Image (cartoon, grey):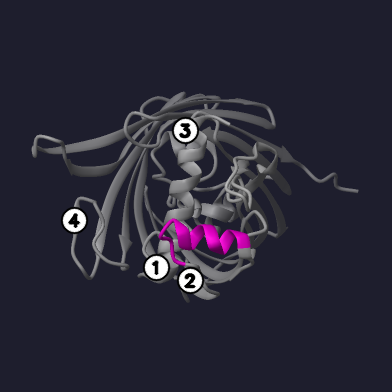
């Protein structure tokens, strides 16, 4: 196991335990990464343009945009030099001309983490044979439903999601939450709103620590965690988009999103104790609706370097896509912070049901 892998896990565990004892800021943040290389290439500016199976994550109202009876998508990416792996799978099915149902599964995890809590035996000797490994994993399972309304251009959708988080045999949590979304077409413009964790999402944590592990926690000055409930507060996402057709073959899609959080001050463009606002935008150029080039800007940050100088940063993403009949392959080079980039690949398949 590389040193950076171990450091990553230690930091992840610390954040997890700290969230249980303090305000629920950044709770279930693995669900903020995003799915689909198309959206990631546009810096997650996608709640308005989402019109395929990935809308089950971005905005369930967008599921009504699927043009086939069935649609399937898969995605894989890795972070921190392969220490953490992120996988997504989605399926959408058209029920009738006015409704669609979707299913989403997400896994984010670090595997083969060394457990060194029993490295030292009862006599104070180092015994490397006592080192075992475990995984720290986050799962999300989402069921989505989208429905057209009697108001022309207005589509509504909702998600029900189950969260499962595990840290080896030491700790685990079950959670449940709801999302609600809407998309509205007005002439050449599109607008969208998405409320994640609309009723708040509750994760119930339980811990199963051996006496040896508890002793290690105490000797190293760490608090022994207790069973508790972690709450994820609602987040409001707003978006607007427009598609510009320059020629019958060339077009440009532009979208702007604004993420509003209510869990305290965050390091974003507009921030306060009551609410923080994080803008981001993306572009997608298309040729014959077959070849796509994408770019986006987001995650505006302000920090102070070691000399005390204030520095402002912004993270760019880029991507491309190719559609071949019923298959779409997308790629994104996503910036995850501090010049750390991740290669993201996703594939989408349209399946028509044969009419008897």
| Residue under numbered circle 1 | 24
What's the distance in space between the residues labelled 2 and 4, CA to CA? Answer: 26 Å
Image disc number at residue 61: none
Q: Looking at the magenta stretch, what is its main secondary structure?
A: helix
- Label 3 residue SS: helix
The residues bearing labels 3 and 1 have C-alpha atoms spaced at a distance of 27 Å
- SS of the residue under disc 1: loop
Secondary structure category for the residue under label 4: strand
Report how far apart the C-alphas of labels 3 and 4 lie in the structure: 33 Å
Mark 2 secondary-structure assignment: strand
Task: Answer whether residue 215 is magenta in the image.
Answer: yes
Mark 3 vs mark 4: in front: 3
For image coordinates 25% across by 61% down, the residue present is: 276
Q: Tell me the CA gap for discs 1 and 2.
A: 7 Å
Q: Position of residue 3 (x, y in %)?
A: 49, 32
Point 70% across, 38% down: residue: 129
Q: Is residue 238 above or below residue 75?
A: below
Distance from disc 4 to disc 1, alpha carbons, whole Å, reads 20 Å
Looking at the image, is mark 3 or mark 1 nearer the viewer? 3
Q: Residue at the location (58% across, 55% down)?
A: 56
Marked residue nearer the N-terminal end (1 or 2) = 1
Instruction: Give the x, y percent position of residue 324.
Output: 65, 24
Q: Is residue 356 visible?
A: yes
Quadrant location of residue 354?
A: top right
Q: Label 2, on which residue?
A: 230
Residues in magenta, as a range: 212-223
Residue 125: within the magenta?
A: no
Of the image marks 3 and 1, the number of the one nearer the N terminus: 3
On the image, numbered disc 3 is attached to which residue?
A: 4
Find out whether the residues at labels 1 and 2 contact each other: C-beta distance under 8 Å.
yes
Mark seen at residue 270: 4
First of labels 2, 4 by sequence position: 2
């Amino acid at each position: 196991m590389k040193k950076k892998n171990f450091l990553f896990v230690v930091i992840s565990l610390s954040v997890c335990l700290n969230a249980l004892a303090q305000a629920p800021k950044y709770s279930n943040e693995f669900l903020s990464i995003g799915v689909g290389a198309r959206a990631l290439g546009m810096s997650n500016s996608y709640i308005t343009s989402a019109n395929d199976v990935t809308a089950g994550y971005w905005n369930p109202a967008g599921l009504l945009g699927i043009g086939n009876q069935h649609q399937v998508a898969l995605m894989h990416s890795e972070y921190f030099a392969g220490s953490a792996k992120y996988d997504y799978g989605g399926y959408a099915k058209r029920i009738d001309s006015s409704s669609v149902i979707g299913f989403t599964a997400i896994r984010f995890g670090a595997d083969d983490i060394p457990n060194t809590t029993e490295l030292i035996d009862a006599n104070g000797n180092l015994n490397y044979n006592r080192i075992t490994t475990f995984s720290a994993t986050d799962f999300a399972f989402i069921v989505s439903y989208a429905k057209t309304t009697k108001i022309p251009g207005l589509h509504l959708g909702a998600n029900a999601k189950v969260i499962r988080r595990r840290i080896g045999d030491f700790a685990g949590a079950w959670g449940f939450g709801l999302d609600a979304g809407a998309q509205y077409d007005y002439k050449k413009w599109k607008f969208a709103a998405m409320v994640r964790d609309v009723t708040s999402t509750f994760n119930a944590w339980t811990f199963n620590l051996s006496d040896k592990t508890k002793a290690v926690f105490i000797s190293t000055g760490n608090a022994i965690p207790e069973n508790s409930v972690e709450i994820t507060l609602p987040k409001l996402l707003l978006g607007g988009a427009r598609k510009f057709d320059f020629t019958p073959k060339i077009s440009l899609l532009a979208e702007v999103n604004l993420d509003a959080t209510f869990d305290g001050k965050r390091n974003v463009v507009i921030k306060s104790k009551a609410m923080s606002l994080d803008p981001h935008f993306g572009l997608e150029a298309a040729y014959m609706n077959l070849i796509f080039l994408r770019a986006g800007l987001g995650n505006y940050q302000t920090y102070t370097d070691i000399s005390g100088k204030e520095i402002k940063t912004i993270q760019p993403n880029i991507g491309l896509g190719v559609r071949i009949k019923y298959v779409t392959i997308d790629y994104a080079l996503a910036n995850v912070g501090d010049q750390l980039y991740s290669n993201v690949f996703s594939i989408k398949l349209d399946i028509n049901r044969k009419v008897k």
